[in-house]
Each structure stands twice: as structure tokens, then as C-alpha cells.
Amino acid sequence: MLILIALAVVLTCAGTVHASIVVDGIALQSFPADKDLEPFLDRVQSIVLDNGAINFTPYSLMLIQQSREAIKARNYDRAVVLAEYARKISPDLPPAYLAEAGAHFSRNKANAHLLFKGYFLAFVKKLQNVDSLSFFIISNASVIIGAVLLTMLVFALVVMLQYYRHLYHDVRHVIPTAVPHKAVWGCVMLLFLVPVFCSLSIFWVCLYWLVLLFGYMDIRKKCITLVLAGIIALVIPALIVLGSFCLYLPQSDLTKLLWKANYDFCDTNHIEQVETAALQNPDDVEVLFSIGLLQKKEQNFATAQKYYERLLPRDPRSYKTVTNLGNVYLALERWDDAVQKYKDAIALAPERAAAAHFNFARAYQQRFMFREAEPELVQAKKLDHARIDRYLAIYSKNLNRLLVDEVLYKKHIVARAYGLFQGEDTIAAGVWDLLFGGITLVYGPLLLILVSCLNVYVVRKEAFRISTKCTMCGKILCKRCQLVISADMLCAQCHNFLQKQEKLSYKQREAKVSQVARFVKRYRFFTALFSRLLPGAGHIWKGFPVQGVFFLLLFFLLLLKVVTLAVLDGPWDFILTWKGVEAGLCFVVFAVYWVYMLFDIRRVRSKEMEDNLALKRIIGDV
């Protein structure tokens, strides 16, 4: 492990990296010439494998940096070799796959397909790396939460502009006629601003508006309101908790130690920290397992045996512990004990004991029992072909390469971190308060569900007489002020106008046309405003709320994705230049979508306005 620590001496990653590398006691101030580069890196990889490091990230990052420098110098063959060994030395490192693809593409532009392959493999590895996965979930959860909330905000604004006069009309009927209109308008405004006076966030204000105007909406808007309420009550809290956990995960010292011990490189300091954790938590099975694994890799077999034998009574059903103890016994030349442990591991988990079968085969091979070894090797390949092939490819008499050590499942490490996170859930509560200040995470979703159910019940019971709007002039009317409302939703004046306009004077006809024209101009003004500023909002305004909400959500998803790519720095952005390319592509998609929506809204015809034959006859081309 001391040799690995020497290999990890890397200066700052910013700018050109020069490292003093020690291999087998030979100090090299820089990488050798091209002809000696591959043999030199083979020696480095061999040292890494002999020390049992699954991923030696510091060294691979330096190789990626050197590969980029070689590309700038147009030494593409050297760049390819450096990038390939960066991937070989750290096969779980996402940037290594991008660097390798970039180096091949720089050498030959016909290898463009390798860019897509490299990006795909890097994405897959990103989902298996705790730092990359945490950042991926945090950034995308933020985009989804922001897009949903902004969509709801715009939807609530459009609904408020469409129906606030309906509410005023009904309030006017409740308040005595002696009260001036301006006072009634003031009451309505106060009614809309109640959440503001209660120090609630803007999103509670929007939800309150939707609840307040729920009875005036058509069936599609009501369904959208209920769906948005359900998402905010159920999905948003789940995303907040998930994002908060992913924010906590890379900051958990014990989780990072367990991850490094099982899947990455641990230096002497890390090993001491794991040993300290084992002393502080003598019954912690994951910590005992990890320190036993590290001691075996360090070839401290007696110490590893001590930890595994302490662990076995605490977790006797763990086939991983039994397999690794068998490896220690084999290293200590206790052949019979090792074989018995491999048999025990196979009995405990016959469908998952590929490592036990493989190590059993190695034990037979040490006694030159090749006929007995063959069926064990075949069964090992059957259970886990990829891992067995990897160990066959790196075969050496070194015990870290000869035998397969079991490691903790990644999901168990993450589950342990989640258990620690539950005791420190202030992050999720803080994020919720930032978005929905005024009502806590515990009661907010429950209150929203109860209010939505009450709203549906009240509307279905038709306990209140709800006003409507004249489709010609936009006048608000109800059965209290007009006992009979035609199927076309026309006010009495417009209905009489259509029936008897030949008998009306020129002045009366002009007054009515002027009133209708003002309604049409207001309608077209908001259509143009919403269409240009917020693609999708124009569809909602024109009476197509389902399409409008979908287009609006997609608009905000693209916009926020561009913003997060431009603002947030991922764990590997300091070594990669792909972030700008990804952000640029997203921006191009966003811009194309915006332009497309500007033209699409012109094709959408509202039955209330563009297809209203009565309006066409009255105002012509107003």
C-alpha cells in the first residue's frame, strides 16, 4: 500500500499536472517516452492490482489530465494510451470512459460513434459511483421540482386572470348594494392575498388561488388542479427527501470510508479511520467486514483473521464473510479450513457464491487437483461470468489477484447512510421551508390533500351558485342576475342583439360592437403575451389546458436543465470539458422548442374566439 501512496502524489489538477512517481523504488519526474509508456503503465497497473485496489482514482485522474495535454500537443497515439490505462486502472471512474472516447475521436474523426459509446458507458458508471450518482439525482430532482412548481405558478396565474371577475361577481351579490364597487374590489383583493398576510410562500399562494377558483373551472382545469395538488403533496416531498439524502450521502464520513474500503483506494489514513470506527463500534458488521478486507489486502492476514472471526458470530449467515475468511485461511496455508469455509459459503448462498466457487477452484489448483477444480470454475462462471473473466485476465500468484474477495453490496452501504440520514433530516425540512415556508413538511402535504378532497365535495354538491361568462362580450352573469342563460352562454344584451340588431339604432349597434371588440382585444393581448413569454401558457388561455400544461412543463424542464448545467459543478467537471458541450446542446434544444411553440400557438384555434361565428359576423377583422 505504501507504493500506492507514492503513486498518488499528484499536484493540483488545475493546469498542467507534473507528478513525482515512484515505482519499485525508481523515481520518475515525468512519464517516459512514447515507446516506453505502455510497459511503464503496465507496471503501474500491476502494482495497483497487487495492492487489491479496485479503482485507483488519483492516478487515473492524472492520466486523464496528461491525455488532454497530449491531445493539445497533437500526440494522439500517446493520448489514447494514457486514456486507456486511466480506464484500466479505475474501471468504475466515469471520466475515464469520456477521456478514452475523446482521445480515439481526436486521433481519427471517423470514430465519432465512440463518443456516443463513451458517453453511454460514462453515464452507466455515473449511476454506480456514489459522488456522481448523488449529483445526478440532486440536479435532476431540482429540475423536476422547479419545473412542476413554476408550471403550477403559471397555471394559477392564467386561471386567476380568467376567473377573478367571476369571483368578484359572486362576492358582489353577497355584499349589500350600498357598498361601493371599489370597496368590493378591495375585499376581493384581500381575499386573494390572505396567504401573503399569513407569511406563506408564493407556491402556497398559487395553490390557494386554485382552491379559491376551483368551482369556476371546466372539468379539464379541475383535473389538472387535482393532479398538481397530488404531485405537490406526494411526489415533491419524496423528491425533496431523496435530493436531501443525496446531498447528505457524499458528506457522510463513515459512508465514504466504507465505499473507499470496498470499491476504491484507501491510504494509511483511511485505514486508521476505519480501525478507529471498529473500536468505537465493536458490533458494527459493515465496519468489521471492511477493516478485515483492508487488512487482507495489506497482507496482514493474522489481523484480518481476527476481525473476520469477531464478525462471524455477529453475522453467521453472511456468505461474504465466510468466503473472505476462507481466503485468509488459504493465505495462512490452512488449506482444510479454507476449503471448509468455501463449502459453507456455497451452502449459505448457492446462487450468489461465484467467488467461493472460484476460490475453491484455486485451492484445488494449489494442490494440483485440476480435475476437481474444473467443475468449480465452470460453476463460478455460470454465476458471475464478468467478474470471473476479469480475475482470470489479471491472474497472478499475488493473493489479491489470485483470489476473489467479496465486498459489501453498494445498496447496503447506501441503506446504512440512509439510516444515519433519518436521524439528521433537517436538510429535507429546510428545503421544504425554502419552497413552502409557513406550513411544515409534516403537515403541508396532508393539509393539501384534505383541502383538495373538500373542494371536490363542495363543487359536486353544488352548494354555491357559480357565475359564468358571456362568450361574445365577456360579461359575467349568473342565474341571480339573469334567470335564463342560453346554451351558447350569451348574456341577455348579446342575445337580443343577435336577434334584433336590424331594429337597433346605429349608436346602439356601435356600442355593442365596441364592447365586443374590447373583449376580443383583451383576449388577443394575453394570448400574444403568454405565447411569447411562456410557451404553453397560451394554450391554457385558449382553452386547451392539458396540452398547455404539458408544453409548459417541458419548457421549464429544458430551461432549468440548461441553468443547472451552466451553474452547478459536478464531481468530475474539473477534469472534463464535456459540461459546456452538454449545456450547449440542451440550450439549442431549448431554443428550437421555444421557436416551434411560437409558431404552434398560431395554429391553435379557440372555439370561444376564432371559431365563434357570431363574433366573426359582428366585429369582422377586429
Image: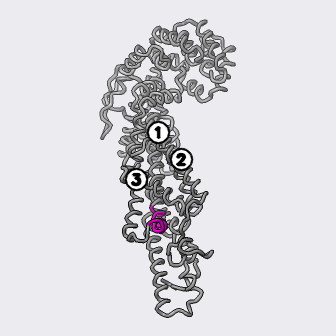
Number of residues whose C-alpha sits closer than 10 Å to that of mark 2, classed few (under 14), some (14–19) or many (20 or more): few
Distance CA(mark 3)–CA(mark 2): 17 Å
Number of residues whose C-alpha sits closer than 10 Å to that of mark 1, classed few (under 14), some (14–19) or many (20 or more): few
Residue 508 is left or right of residue 369, and the answer is left
Q: Nearer the viewer, residue 395 or 139?
A: 139
Q: Main secondary structure of the magenta part?
A: helix
Q: Amino acid at mark 2?
A: Leu
- Secondary structure beneath dot 1 equals loop
Residue 365 place in picture, x, y as percent: 62, 13
The residue lying at 45 percent from left, 17 percent from top is: 291
Q: Nearer the viewer, residue 554 or 344?
A: 554
Query: Circle 2 is placed at which residue position?
Result: 450
Query: Circle 3 is placed at which residue position?
Result: 195
Vertical side of 551 occupied by 401: above or below: above
Q: Nearer the viewer, residue 472 or 537?
A: 472
Q: Earlier in the sequence, mark 3 or mark 1?
A: 3
Instruction: Please tell me whether mark 3 or mark 1 is closer to you in this view.
Output: 3
What label sits on residue 442 in the rendered view? Answer: 1
Say whether residue 535 is visible.
no
Residue 17 place in picture, x, y as percent: 32, 36
